[in-house]
Amino acid sequence: MADFVLEKAFEALYAGVEDLIVKNYIFKSVFNDAKSRLDDLAPLIKEMAQYNQKMNRPEMRLEALKRVMEKGQELVNKCSTITRWSPFKKYKYARKLLQWEESLKTPLEMLKVQETLQVMRIDVAVDDIHSMMVKQQSAESSSCNTRLELPPLPRLIVGMDAPLKDLKEKLLYDDGVSMLVLTAPGGCGKTTLATMFCQDEEVKGKFKNNILFITVSQNGNLELVVQRLCGHFGSSVPGFQNEVHVLQWMETLRKEKPSPLLLVLDDVWSGSESILESFQCEMSNYKILVTSRSEFPRYSSSYNLKLLEDDNAMKLFYHSTALGDKRSRTLEDLSRKIIKRCNGFPLAITVVGRSLAGQPLEVWRKRDTEWSKGSSVLDSETKLFLCLQSSLDALDKGLTIVKDCYLDLGSFPEDKKIPVGDLIDMWAELYELDDDFVFAYVHELCNRNLATLVDKRHVYLKIEGDDYYGGRFVTQHDLLRELAIYNAKLDPVEERKRIIMDSCGKNVPKWWKEQTYQLANARLLSITIDKEFSMEWPQIQLPKAEVLVLDSHESEVSLPKFVEKMNELKVVIIVGHHRHWLGYIGRSKNFELLELLPNLKRISLDNIPIHSLTKNRMELKSVKKISLKSCHIKAHLNKGGAGKLSYVFPNLEEINIDRCYQPEEQLADFCNLIQLKKISIYNCWDLRSLPEEFGNLVNLEVLRLRSCIGLTNSPGSVRKHKKLNVLDLSGCYCIDELPEDIGELSSLRKLDMRGCFAVRKLPPSVLNLNQLGEVLCGDDNSHLWEACLPTLTNLRIMN
């Protein structure tokens, strides 16, 4: 009998779920939700079995439901064997579990169960029910008048008062804003805030309770939204041939329904821009609030929902753990550590709190110890992992490079401000992109709330389209970084695209300790070392690695010996933490290994003494670009030719010098590199002048001297730079005049002199700059260039 088999399948599944809730904490949160759904289904299944027995005939609906139960049992059996050391299997079955659990709890599936039960009840008393069901289904399918209810609010809401006030300021009181995108990563409370906005008395009064809340989700489309709108207004669903018809219908709707309407489009994913575009027409009496993990700058203004501050985070955590007044000093200390780990992320705080609710103190300590040794919150909180992972999985549809760029961010240390210039070097070589195009991928990550762009440039130096990226950084929330690292570990070590060695003291990867893997195919190697590092380097071989990121807190920055065999290495990024401004110059070791790398093209040094490169007699003939950040350039220079950077980099084409100390002596050395095409010097405050030898750089195309506030004179030998296209003097406010012979720059197309407040007149030779097409300047000196417009007819002046 199908009813007996179904009951037995259900009982076995229920027992397996209960057992795994106790024994396997990896999937605990998912199984808890599944058990709740099974509790709801239990009486319905029992009653269906009873009616089926009375009818005394097989029931196909029960067979289908039985297969769902058996599928659940199969997943339970497989999950019982998975441990935290099997991240790929965990990820694979966690997704399957979530899909199965969703099938249990969605209203559609529950409706099917209820409908089946109702049909059975009628079948007991009535023989001919088929025509009745056809009519009933037809009536149901033709009706669109169901008004959606708002999502339920959590019992405790913290940190939403200020954002709610901001939303009302922007959307309720500003008549110039008809659509607002509320954006944040998944799990930050966007839907909660949108629901609070709809329930606000002032908002309900403004729209006279004419509020429609539509959950769009990842597979949503415009037709779904239109159907909901039609249902809301009690009208039939029109047929649209194209988007023009949609806009026409929207205009008709505006005229026929003049009363104010608040439309909330919840959980709109990137790729659904057409939905927003359809609502861009002028509708002064309509307001649209969009919640999304992405920003849509083309279509509307945005409001970024911030993460919780410590006080509110602690309130939410205590509520999630149900501690009440039972908090001890020990629990409070552990709670602060956990809150710091969650870093204000509401979903993380909630799921971690619930997982610790009712657990003994030993479990709390065990969790804290695991995290301190490098374990991730995502290892134990599967639902949190899947929520964050869904944003990453969405990039699989035609945005694989964007996904790869996101995963590469995990190669940089926690809480690190990543220089955009380093990302450009990395991604240009890894993905064969032009440097100018890479920044578009930075913006794409930021628009999707997978990273944050931090602009440290002075306000008058900020301009769109600037192709120099000094002063701009990318940051990433700790959990998003952990997600990137987690994905990097899904494959076996020898098959990973990225190998991340994040070693704190003696907490190094298990495979490193055991020296298990000798050969790996990773294209990117990241190494982070703290002051307590005392392990020997593994004898790993990385013949395909193209990028090395080394961040070292050791007093002696040392390259691993195995670097000498990384023949495909193209980019090296090394970050030290030396306090040379106090008179201490850090030591370096094994930098001569770089000479053995035939394909090395780009080097970035941050807080590394320059003598690391000059103390050994080596030539890096393949290197085309070097970036020096916070480096003590003058220190420990050798007097012989082998100790000069011009000897080390004989074929250098580009150099960036950012926040470096005493650079003047080395600049004279660089003047011997006649093949140099780009020089960018940024924020070097003690730079007083440029050497006359600068005229030797006859192939120079770009010269930037940005925010060098000690620079008093522009380069006097500028007349020799016949190929110079860009001259940037922005932020050099001590310069009081341009070079007298600037008119001899026959190729100059762009001049940036924003912040050059002291310039009061232009040399007469500027009238010879026939190729000059763009001058950026402030109000203090724009009139000087306006006087040149009759002669320089192609000139455009930008303030």
Image (cartoon, rainbow, N blue to C red):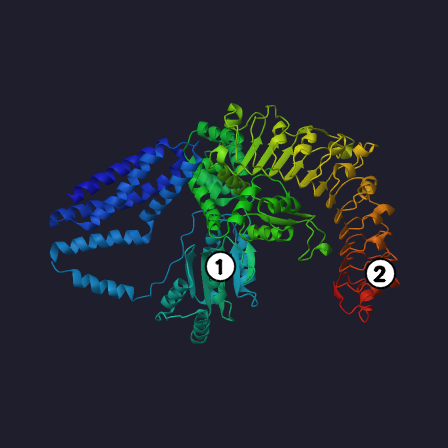
With respect to residue 365, does 113 lie above or below? below
Residue occupied by mark 1 = 290
Q: Amino acid at mark 2?
A: Gly
Q: Is residue 380 above or below residue 205?
A: above
- Where residue 56 appears, as percent x and y from the top left, is 11, 48
State the quadrant of the C terminus.
Answer: bottom right
Q: Is residue 728 visible?
A: yes
Which residue was labeled with disc 2? Answer: 743
Q: Provide the secondary structure element on which disc 2 rests.
A: helix
Identify the secondary structure beneath mark 1: strand
Q: Amino acid at mark 1?
A: Val
Q: How busy is the neighbourhood of tag 2: few (under 14 within 10 Å), some, or many (20 plus)?
A: some
Compared with residue 296, is residue 7 higher up or lower down, i.e. above or below?
above
Q: Which mark is residue 326?
A: none
The residue located at (26%, 53%) in the rendering is 112
Answer with mark 2 or mark 1, whichever residue precedes in sequence: 1
Q: State yes or no: discs 2 and 1 in contact (Cβ < 8 Å).
A: no
